[in-house]
Image (cartoon, grey):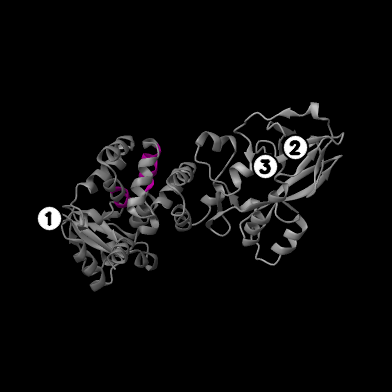
Amino acid sequence: MIYFTELENLTVFDVKGEYLGRVADLCVDPSQNALRVASYLVRTPKKDLLCITYEQMQSISVRAAQTVVPADQIRCYAPDESLLRIKKDVLDQQVIDVDHRKVVRVNDVDFDIQPNGGHTELRIVAANVGLAAAIRRLLQGGLAKHRIRTLTSLFPSKAIPWEFVNLIEPDPARRLKLRISYERLAELHPADVADILEELSRDEQKAVVESLDEETAAEVISEIPTEMQAALLESIPSEKAADIVEEMPPDEAADALQEMTPEASAEVLADMESDEAKEVRTLLGFEENTAGALMTTEFIVVGEEATLEGAIEALRHFEGKIESVHMIYLLGASGALTGAVPLGRILLANSSTPLKDLSNEEVISVAAHVDQRTVVDLFYKYSLVALPVVDEHSRLLGVVTADDVLELVVGRD
């Protein structure tokens, strides 16, 4: 094992033993091998920057490095954004520790030295984020390297295996060149990703969200505070923002757009599919802090004469989030709300049973203009999991769900 702090400023000689300079940085070429050091950048006494490829490096240790070629066969470094530079792009940078679901700052990078057919290769092993790595950096150059190793062994060390490290690159073009993927991050629970987002800068948040698919991004954004949702959606292209908003529950989408500037909100709505945009515009039309503004328009309704088979068919064709569905609502001939059937009763009933026989004896509902305080009180009083919102003719407009009320209560407390 060898650390970047031990490699930085390492003396480099060519095959003839002539002094070339000192190691300034290490480069990885993700398009070839994401774990192997592809080249060594060496600063010469004249301040030129040489690029020694991994095939040209004969040996390397904590004492010195030597090439297998003479100085005249080593080219100067030409800037290349497709290369990952350890000092420039990793050291001191914030990265995402996917395994432990948090953001950390890299203090050092660990490498493994591997001989390979007459030359030496370095392989990235881990990003070091512990106290020992920080102390090692502070002492480097002031004490002999073996003494630093002995001293830092007394302090806690923490290394993240490189496979669990997600680099954050705000530039989309360079992200593509570096082949940075957030697939591992997308596998985490949206609430965990949301916690990670809150630790990042706006540009870093933008980089992560832009790299996620729309459905995952919507789930993640739904977990962060509304003000942050709005700011983040405003920071990304309106087309991408529209795709994300379309995947959000309509009530949460409306809340986020309400927080955005009128210009940005209008632009996102214009880029949305017409049906989704219509739903959100409807919710935006309700006065703030009312049941209408709190409700979602994703619910399941069937006629009051429907059987259990009809309910199951409606469930199969429901395009919203099924976990948010607690009731199937029954409508009379006039379109008025006449009943509500809990999903649990459907599971236990005979397939030919009329739904109205399974309906709650009394359906508690609320008008769209009722304030949120009343909505919360109704949930407490009747131990509700969902509360239908109706117009003056008892026609179903939407449903307030328990998770929305919980957010209200937590925010109010």
Residue at 21%, 65% in the rendered image = 363
Q: CA distance from mark 2 to mark 3?
A: 26 Å
Q: CA distance from mark 3 to mark 1?
A: 63 Å
Residue at 36%, 49% in the rendered image = 229
For the residue pair 308 and 230, the one nearer the viewer reads as: 230
Q: What residue would you read off at disc 2?
A: 21
Q: Amino acid at mark 3?
A: Ala
Is residue 249 located in the magenta-colored stretch of the structure? Answer: yes
Residue 304 visible, this angle: no
233 with respect to 90 (left or right): left
Label drawn at residue 392 = 1
Residue 221 visible, this angle: yes
Disc nearest the viewer among 2 and 1: 2
Q: Position of residue 126 (x, y in %)?
A: 67, 53
Disc nearest the viewer among 3 and 1: 3
Q: Position of residue 339 (x, y in %)?
A: 23, 62
Q: Amino acid at mark 1?
A: Glu
Residue at 55%, 35% in the rendered image = 174
**Bounds of the magenta segment:** 240-254
2 with respect to 292 (left or right): right
Please tell me how crowded label 3 is: few (under 14), some (14-19), or many (20+) other residues with Cα within 10 Å.
some
Q: Secondary structure at mark 3?
A: loop
Q: What residue would you read off at disc 3?
A: 34
Q: Position of residue 370 (x, y in %)?
A: 16, 60
